[in-house]
């Protein structure tokens, strides 16, 4: 079951509404005593339905979760579609400058503040969740992948596990380095991190991918890092990685 409802992020886009998508396992309908871990995701419009996806192709995540009866709630919020780099700004943990986009104001902290203090509370109120840190995860791709690294590092008291698919590790690399070095990260943290083979030639992507995954591993994080054969920077590729990151997030989590 996937429910869709409207939310607002007042400090980011005022009263303008955007969609929240929430997947609830079928098992919840037959047993109201069951409780489930929750995966929060960025770019919610790209997660479930092709008709809502930016480029007409989604991850079709709900179909996978249904087929394999995965005991997981997924809560995903649509991004900011403002053409003046609204998405980049909301998904930037820090301000950075690049040749392609110029200077991007980092409003990621405001995004995470809303997710943690508003959205998560609403999800825990409405749905049969396991609200504790051990059962609270976060995931995203591209800039959403960068935000997932930020969330699991700097909001580690809330999120114990994360998946960062094709994370934008070239944007503000020095700031990302400092963030990972100084964050208070618990050694029981689990991270799935990947990059498509076709992406490795971009700027310093390959160097930064291994640099930051190694830094996190040295911080004690249980890192699964992989290069996706023939992988590209697109939803069709990220859909194929669902079995890998879902199994990593749920691995050895049984009560």
Image: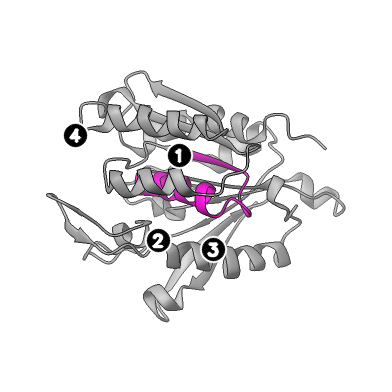
Q: Of the numbered discs in the image, which one, if any, rests on residue 164?
A: 1
Q: Quadrant of the C terminus?
A: top right
Left or right: 252 as drawn, with respect to 211: right
Q: Earlier in the sequence, mark 1 or mark 4?
A: 1
Q: Is residue 98 magenta?
A: no
> Looking at the image, do the residues carrying marks 1 and 4 touch, with CB atoms under 8 Å apart?
no
**Residue 203 numbered mark, or none:** 4
Q: Residues within 10 Å of mark 4 (few under 14, many from 20)?
A: few
Disc 2 is placed on an element classified as helix
Q: Which tag, 3 or 2, sits closer to the chain's start?
A: 2
Distance of label 2 from label 4 (alpha carbons): 23 Å
Numbered disc in front, either 1 or 4: 4
| Residue under numbered circle 3 | 115
Left or right of 12 on screen, residue 241:
right
Question: Which callout, 2 or 4, points at the residue further toward the start of the chain?
Answer: 2
Question: To which residue does mark 2 refer?
Answer: 108
| Element marked by disc 3 | helix
State the residue lying farthest toward the top: 229
Q: Is residue 189 left or right of residue 52?
A: right
Q: Are marks 3 and 1 in contact (CB under 8 Å)?
A: no
Question: Mark 3: few, some, or many residues within 10 Å (few <14, many ≥20)?
Answer: some
Q: Residue at x 86, y 49 (%)?
A: 31
Q: Which residue is drawn at the image coordinates 40% and 51% (left, top)?
A: 51
Chain part drawn in magenta: 140-163
């Amino acid at each position: 079951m996937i429910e869709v409802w409207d939310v607002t992020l007042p400090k980011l886009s005022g009263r303008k509404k955007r969609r929240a998508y929430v997947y609830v396992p079928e098992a919840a309908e037959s047993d109201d005593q069951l409780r489930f871990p929750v995966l929060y995701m960025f770019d919610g419009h790209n997660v479930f339905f092709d008709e809502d996806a930016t480029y007409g192709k989604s991850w079709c995540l709900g179909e996978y979760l249904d087929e394999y009866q995965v005991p997981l709630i997924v809560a995903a919020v649509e991004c900011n579609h403002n053409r003046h780099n609204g998405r980049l700004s909301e998904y930037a943990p820090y301000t950075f400058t690049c040749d392609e986009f110029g200077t991007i104001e980092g409003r990621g902290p405001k995004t995470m503040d809303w997710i943690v203090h508003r959205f998560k509370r609403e999800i825990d109120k409405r749905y049969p969740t396991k609200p504790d840190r051990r059962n609270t995860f976060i995931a995203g791709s591209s800039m959403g992948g960068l935000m997932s690294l930020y969330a699991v590092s700097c909001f580690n008291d809330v999120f114990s596990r994360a998946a960062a698919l094709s994370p934008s590790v070239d944007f503000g690399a020095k700031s990302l380095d400092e963030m990972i070095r100084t964050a208070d990260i618990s050694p029981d943290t689990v991270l799935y991190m990947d990059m498509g083979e076709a992406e490795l030639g971009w700027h310093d992507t390959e160097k930064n991918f291994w640099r930051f995954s190694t830094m996190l591993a040295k911080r004690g994080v249980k890192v699964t890092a992989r290069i996706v054969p023939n992988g590209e920077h697109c939803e069709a590729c990220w859909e194929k990685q669902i079995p890998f990151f879902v199994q990593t997030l749920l691995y050895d989590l049984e009560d």
